[in-house]
Image (cartoon, grey):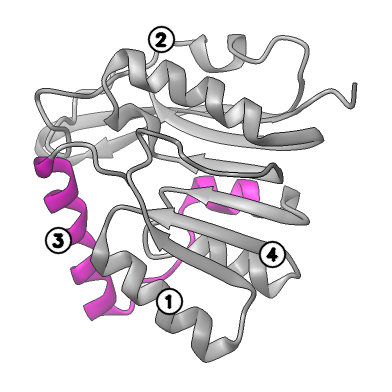
């Protein structure tokens, strides 16, 4: 999650507080799909409570985890310190994508749709730039057909077109691609696309 409008930040900060209270740290289906593919230096953009970052670090990855939620960042910092895991955690405005260096894997699960359209597309391009040659980009977004809108700031969000995500990685090798729909409150649905793509080595 990032500084994507006060409504979205407040929505997720409330959700994270509830999850911490209930001890709900299970990986979501998208994180479960991505975790086995992660290796080396990992950048987790919009890390939330850090469930994926924790599991990646436990299996030997060195993780840089960024989020806009103070609740999430503080929680992950405590967990990483308690287990002495190689995780660097920072609060950040990810719309600007001010990240230095390049990484073996860059993860953005449930992030880009909280940006206005131009910023979402620019963020996707920036993610590609942050991946080392031969490395992986793992991206999950909501797509058109989604009807659950409660978490969005009305002034800034983007539902990607059906095949926009895979089409944004020409020349990359698709390691994983899945579309899915999930029920949401008030008889609405969330439609997702999840992609893991490998950057060419040259």
Residue at 41% of width from left, 83% of height from top? 78
CA distance separating discs 1 and 4: 14 Å
Q: Tell me which numbered mark, 1 or 2, is placed earlier along the sequence.
A: 1
**Labels 1 and 2 touching (C-beta < 8 A):** no
| Horizontal arrangement in the rendering, residue 134 relative to residue 77 (left or right) | right
Q: Position of residue 135 (x, y in %)?
A: 78, 37
Give the percent coordinates (x, y) of residue 143. 37, 20
Residue 199 rendering spot, x and y as whole percentages? 77, 26
Residue at 21 percent of width and 53 percent of height: 12
Residue furthest to the right: 202
Q: Distance between the residues labelled 1 and 2?
A: 35 Å
Considering only order in the chain, which callout, 3 or 2, is on the residue closer to the N terminus?
3
Spatial separation of the CA atoms under disc 2 and disc 4: 33 Å
Q: Image quadrant of residue 120? A: top left
**Which residue is more in the foreground, 126 or 71?**
126
Can you identify the residue that label 4 sits on? 62
Residue extent of the magenta highlight: 6-35
Q: Is residue 12 above or below residue 88?
A: above
| Prevailing secondary structure class for the magenta stretch in the rendered image | helix
Within 10 Å of the Cα at label 1, are there few (<14), some (14-19), or many (20+) other Cα atoms? some
Tell me the residue that label 3 is attached to. Answer: 14
Query: Mark 4 or mark 2, which is nearer the start of the sequence?
Result: 4
Identify the mark nearer the N-term, 1 or 4: 4
Question: Foreground: 50 or 176?
Answer: 50
Q: Indicate whether 198 appears above or below 22.
A: above
Residue 191 horizontal/vertical position (percent): 36, 26
Q: Mark 1 points at which residue?
A: 77
User: What is the secondary structure assignment of the residue under circle 4?
Assistant: strand
- Residue at 69% of width from left, 44% of height from top? 105
Point out the tag, 3 or 4, that comes first from the N-terminus.
3
* Residue 199 shown left or right of residue 88 in the figure: right
Residue to which mark 2 is pinned: 161
């Amino acid at each position: 999650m990032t500084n994507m409008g006060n409504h979205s930040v407040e929505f997720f900060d409330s959700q994270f507080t509830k999850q911490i209270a209930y001890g709900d740290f299970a990986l979501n289906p998208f994180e479960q799909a991505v975790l086995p593919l992660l290796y080396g230096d990992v950048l987790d953009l919009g890390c939330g409570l850090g469930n994926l970052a924790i599991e990646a670090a436990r299996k030997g990855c060195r993780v840089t985890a960024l989020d806009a939620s103070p609740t999430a960042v503080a929680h992950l910092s405590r967990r990483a310190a308690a287990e002495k895991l190689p995780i660097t955690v920072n609060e950040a405005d990810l719309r600007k994508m001010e990240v230095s260096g390049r990484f073996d894997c860059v993860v953005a699960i449930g992030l880009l749709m909280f940006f206005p359209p131009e910023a979402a597309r620019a963020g996707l391009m920036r993610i590609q730039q942050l991946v080392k040659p031969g490395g992986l980009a793992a991206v999950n977004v909501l797509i058109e057909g989604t009807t659950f809108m409660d978490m969005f700031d009305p002034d800034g969000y983007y539902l990607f077109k059906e095949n926009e995500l895979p089409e944004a990685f020409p020349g990359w090798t698709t390691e994983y691609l899945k579309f899915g729909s999930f029920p949401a409150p008030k008889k609405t649905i969330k439609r997702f696309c999840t992609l893991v793509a490998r950057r060419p080595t040259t």
